Amino acid sequence: MERVACSAASLAGHLSLGRIIYLYDDNHVSIDGSTDLAFTEDRAARFEAYGWHVQKIEDGNDVEAVDSAVRAAKADPRPSLICVRTIIGYGAPKKQGTSKAHGEPLGDEELNAAKQNLGWPLEPRFLIPGEVLEFYREAVEKGREREFDWKMRLDAYKQIHPALGVELQRRLNGALPDGWDSDLPTFPADEKGLATRASSGKVLDALSAKLPELLGGSADLTPSNNTKFAESGDFQKDNPTGRYLRFGVREHAMGAALNGLNLYGAVIAYGGTFLIFSDYMKPAIRIAAISHAPTIFVFTHDSVGLGEDGPTHQPIEHLAALRAVPNLVTIRPADANEVAEAWKFAIQRRDGPTALALTRQAVPTLAIGPFVKLSQGAYVLKDFGDSPKLILMASGSEVSLIYTAAQRLFAEGIETRVVSFPSWELFEKQDEAYQESVLPKNIIARLAVEAGATLGWERYAKAMIGLDHYGASAPYKVIFENFGFTVENVVARAKKLI
Amino acid sequence: MERVACSAASLAGHLSLGRIIYLYDDNHVSIDGSTDLAFTEDRAARFEAYGWHVQKIEDGNDVEAVDSAVRAAKADPRPSLICVRTIIGYGAPKKQGTSKAHGEPLGDEELNAAKQNLGWPLEPRFLIPGEVLEFYREAVEKGREREFDWKMRLDAYKQIHPALGVELQRRLNGALPDGWDSDLPTFPADEKGLATRASSGKVLDALSAKLPELLGGSADLTPSNNTKFAESGDFQKDNPTGRYLRFGVREHAMGAALNGLNLYGAVIAYGGTFLIFSDYMKPAIRIAAISHAPTIFVFTHDSVGLGEDGPTHQPIEHLAALRAVPNLVTIRPADANEVAEAWKFAIQRRDGPTALALTRQAVPTLAIGPFVKLSQGAYVLKDFGDSPKLILMASGSEVSLIYTAAQRLFAEGIETRVVSFPSWELFEKQDEAYQESVLPKNIIARLAVEAGATLGWERYAKAMIGLDHYGASAPYKVIFENFGFTVENVVARAKKLI
């Protein structure tokens, strides 16, 4: 029933991932009771429609039948579903075949009766018969042998193909090659600038040329996410060396697949969609964070700045929601140079996922270039004056706005600090001395500006210009103006603080 | 491809919702390009597996064929899929049949060429031929006639069945019956107490007896969510008067269906799952909020207090994520009496959704009874001393904890205010005077305690005891103790603030 399983099965069928074998424990029971309450479709026919090889076994206790079905599944080039009719709580006289055998312990009486029904000794409570133990322990020896065989093959490979062997070992180790970031583009200051999704595309081109293990895809938003690098071919069933994955409109399955790839290792896998659709894949983002999977989530169209698509497509609460996820690092870069640094961070992070929030619309390239301190989460972009009495802070597309506002304030005699704040999580990891150097306690007049929910900015700022309501459909300049993301409003709000 | 559509179709097939007709605009193109890139399953066969009536039309421009398929669909008792092969951008010489016809405007040249290909005048740019206008305008008159017929039938019904007529009109108006909340249970103070999911079940029993329009369900967690009231029968294809919906493991489809029911009107629809699984239905929660649908989301197992199921089932960031959604009211009641008030609020709310966060574990019933001011979002539960210098605030299961801590602090001479804080959104709606009366600006020593992410509590408190990391699998008392949710820790942290 679970939808991510449906999406994954559809994709596996499309790609003909023949090594997948599902054993469907078809016990006709879910937590509410009989599956007939909610789930009466023809599951076997559905998987056939996905392009799967499907088999049915009428009695799950028939070990020979299961074994021969698994053999047939292995022999078939398609992914395989084996529907195995089982009885949950088999042998327990009262709970067998009911949801009680799923949701609660059997209890002593029922357990003893089940053991008697199955001809099993009542004591000891946990009994592993010698021959069973022996059978399973064989797996240890078999595993050792297989590992040895594999290592021998790897060594042989390394001798025959020394360069490839070194490369393979590097990727298995998850180490980056020397100079992997040497060709990362730097972007000159430019008032017109470019969308951070576009600079992200350029950075990806540079990274992919140096990192053959980099692969990625999009949930059917490739031209919008700028996730397809120049040299990628499509990964398809007839092209397994392709480095670009066409996930289709399957965000959750995409997230799950990326996590699987990254946990398997030897690759660095990223995927793109709109920030609003992070909602569809939130469970996979959380699994990445909890499992320390270094998945890179590319979320473009990161605010009301996406314009005409309107409120259903405009993220509001999403940055706050991502920031609340433990062990996820969320980065919203201000310009092209911060984008390059954000990718650099994400590629190097090995113990958890990174989410990049990128604009649809063009943003100026700021005159910071090599001074970008993105990995510290927040940094002083510029002090207007020697002893600022006011801090303006922002992330992403709003950094250039506060920069202009600070110029205006300084022209009026108000010394102002401009802080670019791309990542809360990275700033929280800095020591107190650094944090104090960026946000000194004695400057209490602090205004945060971000085109999203204000929730949480209280941590750093006294006042916020944000969006605690839904967006609107209009050209982005009109939207920003109407929602108070203007130099005039920032200046006015800032003045009230001092 | 979209998974919520798959889940909804599976459920519609199960319930044999014969009035549903999907016209599948099968143009073989998605944003990335050909659907062959990612989506090659047999869609028709999949829907047949769901138990749908399926038809195929080879040429979407064949109006007669479409019309006769719709007639056949209406005649069939099952839900119907009509796969209509179409060509996107039909007639446009360069963009026809490509994703360019989806993602970007045709442009003048291509548009003119398309018009020429289709024998259509180039000017005016927007042309509605007279006969087309006339044909569509007939719908206005037809609609008037149908509305008139319907009103006549309604009036006749009201005359023949006066009492039922009044009742029907009440429900259509969305008005609550007199005395609908008169039998709501009140709970005496009780140290042992009960889980708020359990008191929620009792409240539902009382509400359902007075509100025949109340219906609900669960995503296959009925025995855990306590969402099935005593007198509900299952809504199934052979029992359309049932008031309990078996949604199966389909959270997103459940949320979408609840929204549809509530927007249609004449019913009040709620649905339950674990709070962690709110992630699976977040898009539907957002749609409820943006559409002003008064859906009631019942989220049980609302913290690490759920115990042994462990980190994958323990919500951490979820309260913060819900609070960031504009127009969603999130309520985490502290005890059984707050639960009753929370339901009362949710039932009366007509302009947006309400999320209830309820415990798995028992919580004491506090000695507040009729003093509950839940609808104000936060209120003074008790002042220990005449002029408190410290405020402890908490929601849900942590309220009884801070209450005990306040007793301890008072015994040590520290006058302390205890604030129960079930809902941020409701508190934000109060006037400044009320807010000041609960959280006076001159009391700056304020500690918030909640078994979830601390993000955002800075708005109200100077320090927080929360969880900015994942949970653990253990009995809940062990978990709370290990994560600092103890009287000792609250007392110690509070003392540091003063």
Image (cartoon, coloured by chain):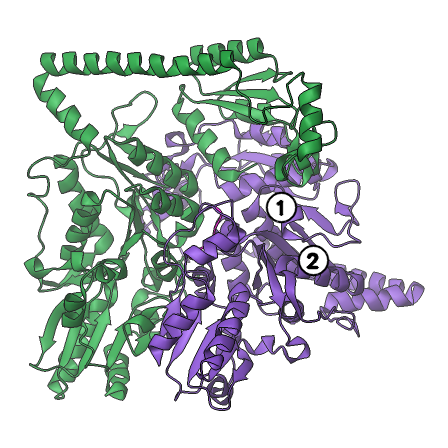
Chain colours: A purple, B green
In the image, residue A31 above or below residue A370: above
Give the residue at mark 2: A201
Q: Which residue is mark 1?
A: A221
Which residue corresponds to the image point at 29% horizontal and 42% vertical from the top-left? B295
Residue B360 location, x and y as percent?
A: 28, 56
Residue at the extreme right: A160
- In-image side of B58 versus B222 (left or right): right
Residue B436: x %, y % from top left: 17, 71
Q: Is residue A141 above or below residue A438?
A: above
The residue closer to the viewer here, B49 or A270, is A270
Location of residue B303 in the rendering, given as x and y in whole percent from the top left corner: 33, 61
Q: Chain of mark 2?
A: A
| On-image quarter of the N terminus of chain B | top right
Chain hosting mark 1: A
**Magenta stretch, overall SS:** loop
Q: Is residue A348 or residue A306 the one in the foreground?
A: A306
**Amino acid type at mark 1:** Leu
Determine which of the numbered discs, if any, sits on residue A231 in the image: none
